[in-house]
Amino acid sequence: MAAMLEDNSQCLFTIIREKRLQELRKKRDERYKMHYVDLATTKFNGSLEPEQEQISFYKHTFSDEDRLEQKVQDFLSEFGQDIEGIKNYVLIVFDTQGYTVTHVRALVLTPNLEVAHGGEEDWSSFLLLRQDAIVEKVDYSQFASNTPDRGLKLKDKALKRKKDGLQLKIAESDAEVQN
């Protein structure tokens, strides 16, 4: 996950899959702790009104809502951002089909994760026809981190145990085949 502060509009941007946002909305009342989307919408979009307000009989509160300021500061510090100068929070949501991004929207959400008045803009027209969502497979087999032994050599005792263990497994599988 990445966050970016756009200087001209003073908006904080993050990106998330459309399905994940739907899941967060659906399970909002079941969640015990705040997600980063909840943190940012509560802190920066708290005064915004939704286009269509969902009527709720009770107000859901999170267990960590009392530490909102600290959690927002911690969240922003991970990305080298500072809380000063941020006016609003914008969530960029996208859909994919296979490996292709098919739909992108920018949303300004209220703390209840509803779209704020005038807070939705479709950015799908900016997509190229073939915009891959997943990078092609790259072979990094020459790096030591991709080799199981990482350049270590087994001692004679370990080699013998390895050989004996392999022979034991072969004998067990032969016995199973015969039964």
Image (cartoon, rainbow, N blue to C red):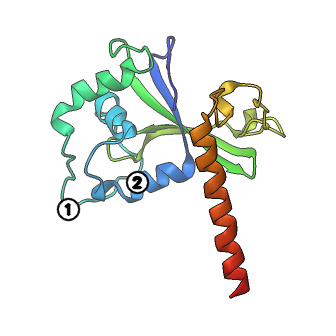
Residue at far bottom of view: 179
Q: Is mark 1 on a helix, strand or loop?
A: loop
In which quadrant is the C terminus drawn? bottom right
Q: Could you say which is closer to the camera, residue 107 or residue 52?
A: 107
In this view, 74 is above or below 134 = above
Badge 2 amino acid: Arg
User: Is 32 left, or right, of 135 in this rendering?
Assistant: left
Q: How many C-alpha atoms fall within 10 Å of the one at disc 2: few (<14), some, or many (≥20)?
A: some
Q: Where is residue 133 in the image (x, y as percent from the top left)?
A: 71, 40
Residue at image mark 1: 57
Earlier residue among tags 1 and 2: 2
Q: How many labels does the image show?
A: 2
Q: Where is residue 122 in the image (x, y as percent from the top left)?
A: 63, 40
Q: Distance between the residues labelled 1 and 2?
A: 17 Å
User: Is 34 left, or right, of 176 in this rendering?
Assistant: left
In this view, 95 is above or below 5 = below
The residue lying at 32 percent from left, 41 percent from top is 111
Residue at image mark 2: 25
Residue at far left of view: 66
The residue lying at 40 percent from left, 48 percent from top is 114
Q: What element carries label 2?
A: helix
Badge 1 amino acid: Phe
Q: Could you say which is closer to the camera, residue 103 or residue 78?
A: 78
Q: How many C-alpha atoms fall within 10 Å of the one at disc 1: few (<14), some, or many (≥20)?
A: few
Q: Do the residues under discs 1 and 2 have CB atoms within 8 angstroms?
A: no
The residue lying at 28 percent from left, 57 percent from top is 29
User: Is 63 left, or right, of 135 in this rendering?
Assistant: left
Quarter of the image where one finds residue 67:
top left
The residue lying at 56 percent from left, 49 percent from top is 18
